[in-house]
Image (cartoon, grey):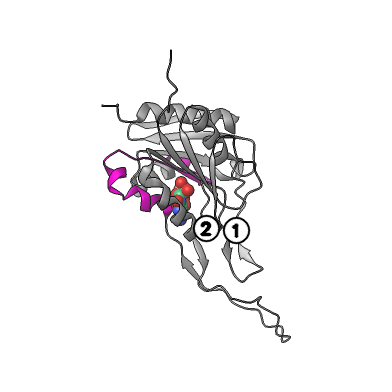
Amino acid sequence: FQPKLLAGKRVVVTAGPTFEALDPIRGITNHSSGKMGFAIARAAHEAGAEVTLVSGPVSLQTPRGVLRVDVKSARDMLAATLAEVPAADIFVATAAVADWRPATSAEQKIKKDGTGAAPTVAFTENPDILATVAKDERAKSGRLFCVGFAAESHDLANHAKAKRERKGIPLLVGNIGPLTFGQDDNQMMLVDANGVQELPRAPKLELARKLVGEIARRLPAQR
Ligand code: C5P
């Protein structure tokens, strides 16, 4: 009898884009489909974990057996994530969180004033969810295993290595942004303290299952 890889583990996954409101009608978002994060949530559940998926606005079905928490903005995503990670063993940040949000969001729809003048938008930086979680004592001591993603356009290995160190996490998954957003398949570069390992192009669910295996074998041994 082979116990499932993540039996008894709790996993939190962030997925999708965030939506940063300008007014009640409009906002700023990005092209993240959420597919990679949803695939990881499904694969972790298949591996026996209890999974919470904190999702930005996407049009995807919730994987069976997974608890889904819907959020809009980066700040909502941070709050929902911080509510879940204290009980978690693994945190996987796949969400394409907006780096900035409009500094103010109008309470009413912004209207044209008839003069042809266009509004200007000032931005303010959003919290970094992964970096916030990675600073936590449980993450630093290895009781909460954190995995980050990096979507780069070029020089993936160097950017991915630098990002792993900057975020202070044990494992970072690099992919080429334009080749993954919205696609059903992906290719991955796994970067940990020992170096780089390539997972060749494959359907996202297949890569998600492989990634779950890679995470499982990096977890601290049970006492
Ligand atoms: O710094 P960069 O945005 O490229 O880092 C990407 C990684 O950090 C992803 O794992 C992403 O989910 C996470 N992230 C986050 N909160 C942010 C920005 C990125 O959790 N505000």
- Would you say 105 lies left or right of 25 here? left
Kindly identify the residue that appears in the image at 51 percent across and 54 percent down: 97
Closer-to-camera residue (127/197) = 127
Instruction: Name the outermost residue toward the bottom.
Output: 115
Q: Which residues are magenta?
A: 129-157
- Which quadrant of the structure image shows residue 164? top left
Circle on res. 85: none
Find out whether residue 150 is within the magenta segment.
yes
The secondary element bearing badge 2 is classed as loop
Q: Would you say the beta carbon of the disc 1 residue lies within 8 angstroms of ligand 1?
A: no
Residue 222 at what x, y percent from top left? 29, 27
Q: Are discs 1 and 2 less than 8 Å apart at CB?
A: yes
Q: Indicate the quadrant containing the C terminus: top left, top right, bottom left or bottom right.
A: top left
Closer-to-camera residue (109/62) = 62
Residue denoted by label 2: 98
Kindly identify the residue that appears in the image at 56 percent across and 35 percent down: 39
For label 2, count other residues whose C-alpha is less than 10 Å away and answer few (under 14), some (14-19) or many (20+).
many
The amino acid type, in three-letter code, at marker 1 is Thr
- Would you say 138 lies left or right of 200 here? left
For label 1, count other residues whose C-alpha is less than 10 Å away and answer few (under 14), some (14-19) or many (20+).
some
Residue 99 at what x, y percent from top left? 49, 59
Closer-to-camera residue (156/81) = 81
Closer-to-camera residue (68/196) = 68
Compared to 114, does 16 lie above or below? Answer: above
Q: Can residue 3 be seen from the camera position used here?
A: yes
